[in-house]
Amino acid sequence: MAELPFELSPEQAAELVASGDAELIDVREEYEREAGYIPGSRHLELGQLADRADELPAELPLVFQCRVGSRSAMAAFAFRRAGFDAHNLDGGIVAWAASGLPLEGEIAQH
């Protein structure tokens, strides 16, 4: 697989996750996730990431996502420095929704 850019478009991320070629990590707070989330994403709040990094697959690219991409970019940079193949979902769940990609939860109903 070709080297992935740091910022992944929602379409790129969706393709990687659907094919099992990446793990999507939702770093938002619990109340944000309850309002809606990307199907197949793993929820690890930003404040828990460092303590739970061993739960993440080291063999797959990790795509971090938050609401608009700023918190997830911080997480992705930190994990990249720690040796992970880490990426950011450009525009976060807002861009994902705007691209017409699937969502679950309350926001999917609107």
Image (spheres, helix red, strand yellow):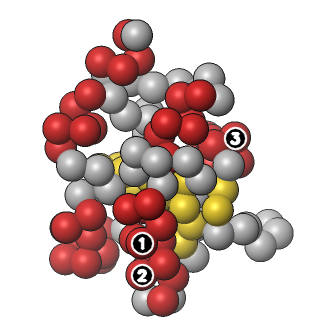
| Residue contact at pointers 3 and 2, CB within 8 angstroms | no
The residue at 66%/56% (across/down) is 8
Classed neighbour count for the residue bearing mark 3: other residues with Cα under 10 Å, few (<14), some (14–19), many (≥20): some
Q: Give the secondary structure at mark 2.
A: helix
Distance in Å between CA atoms under marks 2 and 1: 6 Å
Q: Give the secondary structure at mark 1.
A: helix
Classed neighbour count for the residue bearing mark 1: other residues with Cα under 10 Å, few (<14), some (14–19), many (≥20): some
The residue lying toward the viewer, choosing from 67 and 81, is 67
- Regarding residue 59, the answer to whether it shows in the image is no
Q: Amino acid at mark 3?
A: Glu
Q: Position of residue 75 (x, y in %)?
A: 40, 71
Q: Position of residue 73 (x, y in %)?
A: 48, 67
The residue at 42%/81% (across/down) is 78
For residue 103, above or below residue 5: above
Q: Position of residue 19 (x, y in %)?
A: 65, 45
The residue at which mark 1 appears reads as 74
Give the residue furthest to the right. 2
Distance in Å between CA atoms under marks 1 and 3: 21 Å
